[in-house]
Image (spheres, grey):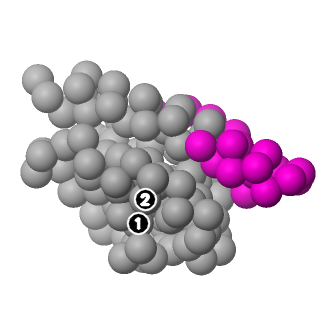
Amino acid sequence: MKNILVLCTGNSCRSQMAHGYLNHFQNKLANIYSAGIETHGLNPMAVEIMKEDNVDLSHHTSNHVDEYQGIEWDFIITVCDHAREHCPFIPSKNAIRVHQNFPDPSKVKGTDKEIVEAFRKTRDQIKEFCHDFVKEELMD
């Protein structure tokens, strides 16, 4: 089984969504982990927005990248520019490093409706990325 790490700044929103979708689209082809270079706790709005698409994140935890030392990664996916730029070096001689920056919906200011729409927009972008990633990288 392949090991995939999804990395973001706080492991509260975007990396959690990607973790959920990667698990959703793959069928026991990989072990999926998500982490942050910091831990900010699980974002409740991310959990709700994913629930709309029948992906349950409620059992996820916000983890620090250091918790996964010693795992040999096949893929390390960064989902925000900040994590890519500030991530400590993760030794993994065979890891393919993939980067895709997604907007951070937790930083959006506005009405409740505007905030929900920002979360949905990011969710849908992450969903498409994860679907394509699984199809292209895991289903040979």
Q: Nearer the viewer, residue 49 or 81?
A: 49
Residue 116 in the magenta stretch? The answer is yes
Tell me whether the residue at label 2 lies in contact with that at label 1, contact meaning CB atoms closer than 8 angstroms: yes
- Report x, y in % for residue 43: 61, 68
- Report x, y in % for residue 112: 79, 57
Label 2 sits on what residue type?
A: Lys
Label 1 sits on what residue type?
A: Leu
Q: Nearer the viewer, residue 111 or 132?
A: 111
- Residues drawn in magenta: 98-120
Labelled disc at residue 123? none
Residue at mark 1: 57
Q: Going by the picture, which residue comes out furthest to the right?
A: 110
Q: Locate residue 10: give its quadrant.
A: bottom right
Residue at mark 2: 51
Q: Residue at x 26, y 33 (%)?
A: 134
Q: Nearer the viewer, residue 134 or 128?
A: 128
Is residue 26 in sight in this rendering?
yes
Q: Is residue 71 above or below residue 80?
A: below
- Report x, y in % for residue 118: 70, 43
* Count of labels in the image: 2
Q: Residue at x 51, y 35 (%)?
A: 124
